[in-house]
C-alpha cells in the first residue's frame, strides 16, 4: 500500500507539472499566433478598462478615438489605425426577453476578421459623419455562432440591441454575418457593429470613447521605433507591440498563474513526502534483515544501492504513468477550453515538457533514496539483532 501511494503521489506531481507547463506553453504560443494573425502591429490604450458606475458597462479610456486614429493613419509608416470599443449591451430576438452581451464597435472588413456566413458590415462608419454623429445608421450587426444558436437567428434575421432596455427596444439590427473572430479575441460571445453605432446606442458619443486603437504598419517598419515615436506624440496613451500586449494580458492573470504554480508545488511536495515515507518505511520494516546483512559483512553502500534501485523503479513507474496520463488529460482540457473560451489547442504538449515531468519523478525518487541512505548509515546491527 505504501508503494502504491508513493507511486500515485509521484504520478500526481508529474501530471500536475506537465499539465501546468503545457497550459503555459499553449497560452503563450496561442497568444502569439492570435496577435500575429490579427494583422495588427501596435496597440494603443489609455490604461486599464474599468467598470462605469453610471452605465453599468465598461468605461473605455481612449477619448476622441476617431480623431486620434485618423491622425495616426496619416503617418507614412502606418497603413491603418482602427479604433475598437467594447461595451455591454442588451440583446433580444423578440424585444421582450433580453440577455446581457458584450458589444464590439469595429469594422469587419479585411483578412483579420473571418466571416463564416454572410457578408459582414457592408459600409464604413458612415454614422460618425465627421464627428457629429448625424450620418445614417446602417443597423447591421455581425454575431457569434453561440449567439445565433441562443436566439435562434441567422443571416437576414433581426435582433433588438441597445445600451439600456429602452434603447434596445428602439433599435432593431439586421444580422449580416456570423463570425467567431471577436469572440476568440475577447473570450466571450459578442455582437459586432460599427463603432459610432455602438457609441450611439450606449450613449458614449459625447467623448468618442474607445477601448483601444489597433495599428497596422507598413511592411518593413520597426514596431518598437514607431511605438517610441507615438508615445512621445501621445504621452497620455500606452503604445505596445504584440509581444508587450501579450505580456500585459498574462500579467493581468498573475493570480491565476500563481495559483497554478502553488498547486504544482504542493503536488510535488506531497509526492516527495510519500516517497521519503516509503523509503524510511522500507528501511524500518526490513531493519532486522538489513542488520543481518550488514553483520555478515555486506557494505552499507551495497544496501544503499539496493534501496536506490527499489526507489528508482518506483520513480520510473510513476513518471511513466504521469507522462502517459498527460495525453488524455490534455485532450480533456483542450475540449473544455474550446467549449468555454472558444480556443482550440490551447494546451500544447512538447517533448521538453514531458522530459521535464519525467525528471521530476526521478529526482523525487532520488530524494527518497537519500533519506534511506542516511537511515541505513545509522543502522546498528548489534542493536537491531539484539531486539
Image (cartoon, rainbow, N blue to C red):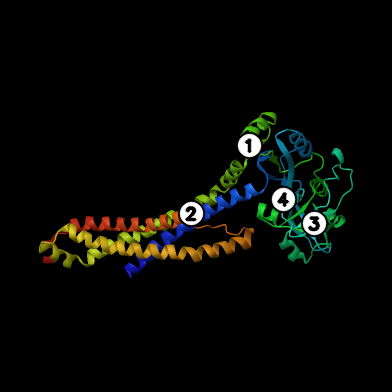
Residue farthest toward the top in the current orientation of the protein: 232
Q: Is 119 on the left-hand or right-hand side of 242?
A: right
Of badges 3 and 2, the one in the foreground is 3
- Residue pictured at 21% horizontal, 67% vertical: 286
Q: Position of residue 38 (x, y in %)?
A: 67, 48
Choose top left, top right, bottom left or bottom right for residue 66: top right
Q: Is 157 on the left-hand or right-hand side of 21?
A: right
Q: CA distance from mark 2 to mark 4?
A: 32 Å
Return the residue nearer the eye: 95 or 132.
Answer: 132
The residue carrying mark 3 is 119
Return the residue nearer the eye: 372 or 243.
Answer: 243
In the rendered image, the quadrant that contains the N terminus is bottom left
If you read the primary sequence from the N terminus, does the residue marked by circle 3 or circle 4 appear first?
4
In the rendered image, the quadrant that contains the C terminus is bottom left
- Residue pictured at 47% horizontal, 63% vertical: 326
If you read the primary sequence from the N terminus, does the residue marked by circle 2 or circle 4 appear first?
2
Label 2 residue SS: helix
Q: CA distance from mark 1 to mark 3?
A: 32 Å
The residue carrying mark 4 is 111
The residue carrying mark 2 is 21
Inspect this view and state whether residue 52 appears. Answer: no
The residue carrying mark 1 is 223
If you read the primary sequence from the N terminus, does the residue marked by circle 1 or circle 3 appear first?
3
If you read the primary sequence from the N terminus, does the residue marked by circle 1 or circle 4 appear first?
4
Q: CA distance from mark 1 to mark 4?
A: 20 Å
Amino acid at each position: 500500500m505504501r508503494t502504491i501511494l508513493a507511486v500515485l503521489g509521484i504520478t500526481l506531481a508529474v501530471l500536475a507539472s506537465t499539465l501546468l507547463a503545457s497550459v503555459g506553453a499553449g497560452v503563450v504560443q496561442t497568444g502569439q499566433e492570435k496577435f500575429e494573425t490579427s494583422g495588427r502591429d501596435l496597440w494603443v490604450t489609455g490604461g486599464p478598462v474599468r467598470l462605469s458606475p453610471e452605465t453599468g458597462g465598461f468605461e473605455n479610456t481612449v477619448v476622441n478615438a476617431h480623431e486620434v486614429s485618423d491622425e495616426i493613419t496619416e503617418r507614412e509608416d502606418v497603413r491603418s489605425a482602427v479604433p475598437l470599443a467594447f461595451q455591454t449591451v442588451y440583446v433580444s430576438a423578440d424585444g421582450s426577453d433580453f440577455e446581457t452581451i458584450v458589444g464590439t464597435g469595429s469594422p469587419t472588413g479585411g483578412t483579420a476578421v473571418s466571416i463564416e456566413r454572410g457578408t459582414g458590415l457592408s459600409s464604413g462608419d458612415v454614422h460618425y459623419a465627421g464627428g457629429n454623429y448625424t450620418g445614417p445608421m446602417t443597423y447591421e450587426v455581425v454575431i457569434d455562432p453561440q449567439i445565433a444558436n441562443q436566439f435562434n437567428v441567422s443571416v437576414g434575421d433581426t435582433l433588438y440591441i441597445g445600451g439600456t432596455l429602452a434603447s434596445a427596444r428602439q433599435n432593431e439590427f439586421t444580422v449580416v454575418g456570423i463570425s467567431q473572430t471577436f469572440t476568440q479575441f475577447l473570450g466571450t460571445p459578442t455582437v459586432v457593429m460599427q463603432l459610432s453605432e455602438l457609441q450611439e446606442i450606449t450613449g458614449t458619443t459625447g467623448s468618442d470613447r474607445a477601448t483601444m486603437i489597433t495599428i497596422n504598419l507598413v511592411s518593413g517598419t520597426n514596431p518598437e521605433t514607431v511605438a517610441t515615436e507615438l508615445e512621445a506624440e501621445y504621452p497620455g496613451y500606452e503604445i505596445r507591440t504584440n509581444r508587450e500586449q501579450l505580456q500585459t494580458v498574462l500579467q493581468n492573470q498573475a493570480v491565476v498563474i500563481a495559483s497554478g504554480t502553488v498547486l504544482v508545488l504542493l503536488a510535488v511536495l506531497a509526492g516527495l513526502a510519500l516517497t521519503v515515507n516509503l523509503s524510511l518505511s522500507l528501511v524500518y520494516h526490513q531493519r532486522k534483515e538489513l542488520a543481518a546483512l550488514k553483520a555478515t559483512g555486506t557494505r552499507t553502500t551495497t544496501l544503499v544501492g539496493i534501496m536506490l534501485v527499489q526507489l528508482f523503479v518506483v520513480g520510473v513507474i510513476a513518471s511513466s504513468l504521469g507522462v502517459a496520463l498527460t495525453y488524455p488529460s490534455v485532450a480533456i482540457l483542450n475540449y473544455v477550453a474550446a467549449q468555454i473560451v472558444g480556443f482550440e489547442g490551447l494546451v500544447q504538449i512538447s517533448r521538453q515538457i514531458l522530459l521535464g515531468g519525467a525528471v521530476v519523478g526521478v529526482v523525487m525518487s532520488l530524494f527518497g533514496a537519500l533519506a534511506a541512505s542516511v537511515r541505513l548509515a545509522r543502522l546498528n546491527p548489534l542493536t537491531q539483532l539484539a531486539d
